[in-house]
C-alpha cells in the first residue's frame, strides 16, 4: 500500500512548478517572516478557530479534561 503524500511537498512538484531545488535551504528566514510568513501568521490569527466545532472532542472547553476522560470511559463501558 502506498501512502498518499501531498504533492506539494515533493521534489517532483518543485520540478513541475520550476521551484529551485535549494529553495527551502536558501530561504532567508528573516525576509520570509517579513513577507509571506507574516501574511500566513496573520491569516492563522484571523481565522475563526473558536467558531468551529471540534468533531474529535466536541466537549473540549465545556468540561474539564479529566471529567471528559471519565465520561468517555463510562460511554465505552456501556
Image (cartoon, rainbow, N blue to C red):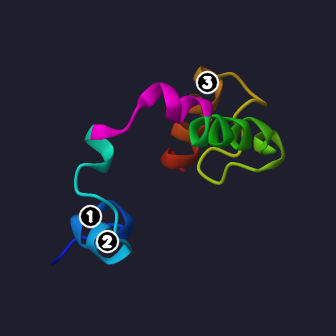
Q: Quadrant of residue 44?
A: top right
Seen as rendered, the residue at the extreme left is: 1
Residue 47 lies within the magenta run: no
Front of the two marks 3 and 2? 2
Label whose residue precedes the other's in the sequence (3 or 2): 2
Q: Quadrant of residue 63?
A: top right
Q: Which residue is mark 3?
A: 65
In depth, the one of 47 and 61 nearer the eye is 47
Rendered location of residue 11, percent (x, y)? 23, 65
Q: Residues within 10 Å of mark 2 (few under 14, many from 20)?
A: few
Rendered location of residue 24, percent (x, y)? 31, 44
Q: Which residue is mark 2?
A: 13
The residue at the point 77 percent across, 50 percent down is 52
Q: Disc 3 vs disc 1: Cβ atoms closer than 8 Å?
A: no
Q: Which SS does the magenta portion mostly show?
A: helix
Alpha-carbon span between mark 3 and mark 2: 42 Å
The residue at the point 31 percent across, 71 percent down is 13
Alpha-carbon span between mark 1 and mark 2: 6 Å
Dot 2 falls on a residue whose secondary structure is helix
Label whose residue precedes the other's in the sequence (3 or 1): 1
Q: Disc 1 vs disc 2: Cβ atoms closer than 8 Å?
A: yes
Q: Residues within 10 Å of mark 1 (few under 14, many from 20)?
A: few
The tag on residue 69 is none
Q: Which residue is mark 1?
A: 10
Front of the two marks 3 and 1? 1
In depth, the one of 78 and 52 nearer the eye is 52
Alpha-carbon span between mark 3 and mark 1: 38 Å
Residues drawn in magenta: 26-34
Relative placement, left or right, of 61 versus 13 is right
Q: Quadrant of residue 34?
A: top right
In depth, the one of 77 and 29 nearer the eye is 29
The residue at the point 72 percent across, 37 percent down is 42
Amino acid at each position: 500500500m502506498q501512502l498518499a503524500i501531498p504533492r506539494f511537498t515533493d521534489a517532483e512538484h518543485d520540478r513541475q512548478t520550476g521551484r529551485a531545488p535549494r529553495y527551502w535551504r536558501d530561504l532567508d528566514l528573516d525576509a520570509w517572516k517579513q513577507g509571506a510568513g507574516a501574511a500566513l501568521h496573520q491569516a492563522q490569527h484571523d481565522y475563526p478557530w473558536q467558531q468551529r466545532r471540534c468533531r474529535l472532542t466536541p466537549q473540549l472547553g465545556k468540561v474539564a479534561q479529566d471529567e471528559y476522560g471519565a465520561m468517555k470511559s463510562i460511554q465505552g463501558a456501556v
